[in-house]
Image (cartoon, rainbow, N blue to C red):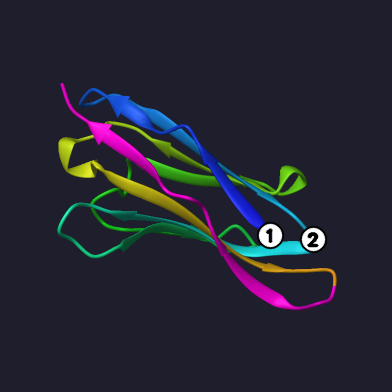
Amino acid sequence: VQLVESGGGLVQPVGSLRRACAASGSILNINRMRWYRQSPGRQRELVTSMTGGGSTNYEHSVQGRFTISRDNGKNTEYLQMNILKPQDTAVYYCNAEYMDYELSQGDAWGQGTLVTVSS
């Protein structure tokens, strides 16, 4: 199972960016999906997550600005980031918990993509 991210890059403060994370491989279903980020000199932190049933959680600093969503038919999760701030600058990683066709559970990570918020 592979997760391929897209949509990173440079954006100005208060701008928006949409990230996508597409899963491929022997996937029966995907349960929880998450986005993490890691800034220089800091530990990786959980930004947001969504269960298979659609329940979401957000880290307090992104509450109201970031939105996680998913398209189960495409095995893809999205992260819409609005009103971006310089402190949102980080490498962002997607993560997915899945079950494969052999009914084994697994955990996959995207390759990570840098998001830079700067004027």
Residue 19 in the image, given as x and y percentages of width and height: 47, 37
Question: Which residue, given by chain and number where applicable, does mark 1 sit on?
Answer: 1
Asked which quadrant contains residue 18, the reply is top left
The magenta span reads 102-119
Q: In which quarter of the image is the C terminus?
A: top left
Q: Name the residue nearer the viewer: 54 or 42.
A: 42
At 30% from the left and 62% from the top, the residue drawn is 45
Point out the residue furthest to the right here: 101
Compared to 57, does 67 lie above or below? above
Q: Distance between the residues labelled 2 and 1?
A: 6 Å
Question: Which residue, given by chain and number where applicable, does mark 2 sit on?
Answer: 26
What element does badge 2 sit on?
loop
User: Contact (CB < 8 A) between labels 2 and 1?
Assistant: yes
Residue 88 in the image, given as x and y percentages of width and height: 24, 43
Q: Name the residue nearer the viewer: 59 or 110.
A: 110
At 47% from the left and 32% from the top, the residue drawn is 7
Whether residue 71 is in magenta: the answer is no
Residue 53 in the image, given as x and y percentages of width and height: 64, 62
Whether residue 109 is in magenta: the answer is yes
Q: In which quarter of the image is the N terminus?
A: bottom right
Number of callouts: 2
108 lies left or right of 60: right
At 81% from the left and 77% from the top, the residue drawn is 103
Q: Which amino acid does label 1 sit on?
A: Val
